[in-house]
Image: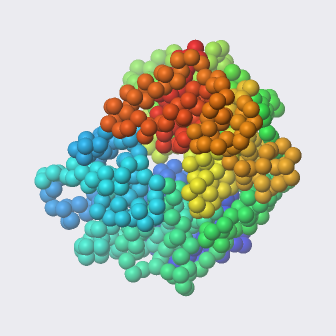
Amino acid sequence: MVSLGDLDPDQQVAASAPRGPVCILAGAGTGKTRTITYRIAHLIERGFFNPNRVLAVTFTTRAAQEMRVRLESMGIGGVHARTFHSAAYRQLSYFWRQVAGDMEWGIVEKKFSYAAQAMKKAGLPQNRERVRDILHEIEWAKASLITPEKYPEIVSQIQRDIPAEAEQISSVYRLYEELKCSPSRMLLDYDDLILYMAAAIENNPAVAAEFRSQYRSFVVDEYQDVTPLQQRLLDAWLGDRDDLTVVGDANQTIYSFNGATPRYLLDFSRKYPHATVVKLQRDYRSTPQIVKLANTVISHARGRVAGTRLELQGMRAHGPQPQFREYDDEPAEARDIAKHIRALLASGTPAQDIAILYRINAQSESYERALSEAGIPYHVHGGEGFFQRPEIKEALRALVRASQSGDLPEELHGVGLAQLVREILAPLGYSSVEPEGSESRDRWYSLKALVELTEELGQTIPDLDLVGLLLRLKERQQSQLPPTMEEITLASMHAAKGLEWDVVFLAGLSDNMLPFHYVHNKGIEKIEEERRLFYVGITRAREVLNCSWALARQEGGRKNRKRSRFFDDLFPEVEQRTIPPRSGRSHCCRECGKKLSTPQERVLGRCLHCPSNAQPGVFAALRQWRSDIARENKIPAYIVFTDATLLAIAESMPKTPADLLDISGIGPVKVENYGADLLRILADFRD
C-alpha cells in the first residue's frame, strides 16, 4: 500500500490530486520524481487506471529507468516510462502497416552523411564543421515544426543567427528530406519518428482509437523543455482528453537552442482552466546557504519566465557559505581547484561526490591537465561511456566466455559471484591493490567499478549467477546507467542538468563565458537563459559550492577579463574594488595608452604605429592558411578572418579555444570551424 504520509504537504497535494490536468511546478531538489511516482502509484491503487494504461515520458533513458525502478520498488509494475523518441519508435513500429502498407522503413544511422550529400547537391562547400552546423539547424527547424519552404521567412522574422544563407539552408533541408526517401523504402531520423507518429494519430481514426484505448493517462517530466514537435505528439496522444500530469520548472529552461520552449508550461493553466497547479519549493538537496544564493541569482531574472519563479526553501542542515574566488589567470585557477580537491579527498570526501562544472566543453582542458598533474582520477561527463571503455568491453567478453564455459577451474567453484568476477578479471589488470602509473590506474579503476557493481547487484539479488549478472549489465548499458566511479566529474553546466554532487566547483565564470560571448548582443532572452544556466549550476551542489573566475587566460597575460555580470547583483561592492568598470573591450592602446580611433586598432588593442609583438613568420603562416581555406571553400579571404584579426591572433598567441574567444572578431562559430587549425599553427611556432 502506498502511503502519502511519506511526502511533505505540497507533495501530498500533487500526488493525491484528482484525475485530470495537473501541473506541478517543481524547483530544483524538491523531490519531483518522488512526487510523480507516488502520484502514478496512488492513481493505480485507487483503481483509476491499470499500470499498462499509463505512459510516463521523460527526457533521458536514465530518468525513465529510474522511474520504473522506483515504481517497481513500490510494488507497481507495468507502467510504460520512456523518452518521447523511444515511445514514438515503439508506437510507429506497431502501427506502420496500418499507415504505410508494405513500404519498408528504417532508422537513419548516420544523419551526418545525408546532410553532407545534401550540401554537395546544393553546391555548398563542405567540411565537418559546416555540415554539423547546418545539420543542427535542420534539427532545430524540425523540432520547431518549420518546413523547408517556411524556413527562410521564419528565421528572418525571429532574426535567428544561422550558419549560412537562409535560402541555402532551406535547399539543403529539402534535399536532406528527399535523400531519405525512395519509391520502395523510407528512412526516418529521430525527429521523423515523432512527426510521423503524430500524423498517424491525427489522420487515421482507427490508429487514434486503438492508441487511446491503450493509454488513458500521461505524465510528462521536464515539461519546460518540450519542443513544438513533441507537444504536437502529446496533443495527438491526448485527443480531447485531459488526464495529463506535467512537471517542470521554468527557471531551469536552458535548451532553447534545440527548439525547447517553456511556453507550454507557462500556458498550462490557460489551456486547462480547471487544472490543479501545485508548487514544490522545499529543497531537500542543497544547504540553506546554497539555496539562498540560487534564489538571489534567479530573483534578478527578467522576462516572462521570471513571472513564475519559485522561491526555494532550504530544508537541509546549515552548511558552509558558498565561496567566490578570483585568480590572476586560468592555470592558477585550475591548479588551486585541484589543490582543494586533493584536500577534500584526503579528508574523506569520495571522489564521485565532487564535480567541476563550466560553460563550454572547450574549458575542460585546463582542469583535465591540472587534475592529471595532481594525480587525481577524473572523467568527462558526456565523453566516452563506461561500457564503451576498451577495458570494460574486454572484461565483459571475458565474463561471457566464462559463463559459456562448463569447466571453470575447480578453485572457482563455490566462491561467491563477486569473488568469481575478481578472479576472472585478475588477468586483465584487476587486483586488491591500486597499481602505480596513470594508465594502469585508470584501467584498474574501471575494473574495480565493475567488481563493486557486481557486489551491489549481488546484494540486491542474492541468487544472482554469472549469466544473470551479464543480463543485468546489459540492461544498465542500454539504460545508460554506469556504475559509480571513484573519479572527479568534469561536465558542462548543460550536461550537468539532472545531476548533483556534494561539492561543486563552478569554474571559469568570466563575463565572456557566462553569459557566453556569443549572446552578449542577442537580446534579453538570451542573456536570461544564461542566468538560468548559472542557477542550474548552483543547484547541482548539495553541501559545498565554490565559484571562481580568472582575469587572464594565461600566466603573465593581460588581466583584461571581468567576472560574470551575474555577480554584480550578489556583491556589487567588489566590482569597484577589484574589477575595472564594465565597458566592453578596452578602447585605449595597451602600449601608449592613447584612445584607439579605428575598428582595426580596437581589434589589435593598440595603435597602428605602435610596435607589434608578433613572432616573425606567425602572421604570414596564418595568412597562408586563410588563403588555403578561402580557396577550398570558394569564399573571399576576409570572410574567414580579416587581416586585423589574424594579426591580433599572432600577437596574443592563444593556447585554447577559450583564449580565441577573447579576441575581437572571433565568435563561437569561427572557433568551431577554425579553432583547431589556428591552435595547431600557433603551437608549431611556440614549439
Q: Return the x and y of residue 527 as percentages of the image width and height.
A: 62, 57
Q: Specify the quadrant that holds the N terminus.
A: bottom right
- Residue extending farthest to the front is 609
Q: Return the x and y of residue 377 as percentages of the image width and height.
A: 65, 27
In the image, residue 528 sits, relative to residue 44, either above or below, namely above
The structure residue drawn at horizontal position 71% and vertical position 23%, both measured from the top left corner, is: 374
- Residue extending farthest to the bottom is 274
The structure residue drawn at horizontal position 20% and vertical position 65%, both measured from the top left corner, is: 98
Question: Which residue is at the front of the view, 189 or 78?
Answer: 189
Question: Which residue is at the front of the view, 391 or 116?
Answer: 116
In the image, residue 383 sits, relative to residue 278, either above or below, namely above
Q: In the rendered view, does 44 fall on the left or right side of 152? A: right
Q: Return the x and y of residue 550 as percentages of the image width and height.
A: 73, 37
Q: How many marks?
A: 0
Q: In the rendered view, does 417 fall on the left or right side of 284? A: left
In the image, residue 477 sits, relative to residue 229, either above or below, namely above
Image quadrant of residue 529?
Answer: bottom right
Question: Which residue is at the front of the view, 232 or 624?
Answer: 624
The structure residue drawn at horizontal position 47% and vertical position 77%, both measured from the top left corner, is: 243
The structure residue drawn at horizontal position 54% and vertical position 35%, both measured from the top left corner, is: 645
Image quadrant of residue 276?
Answer: bottom right
Q: Return the x and y of residue 385 as percentages of the image width and height.
A: 50, 35
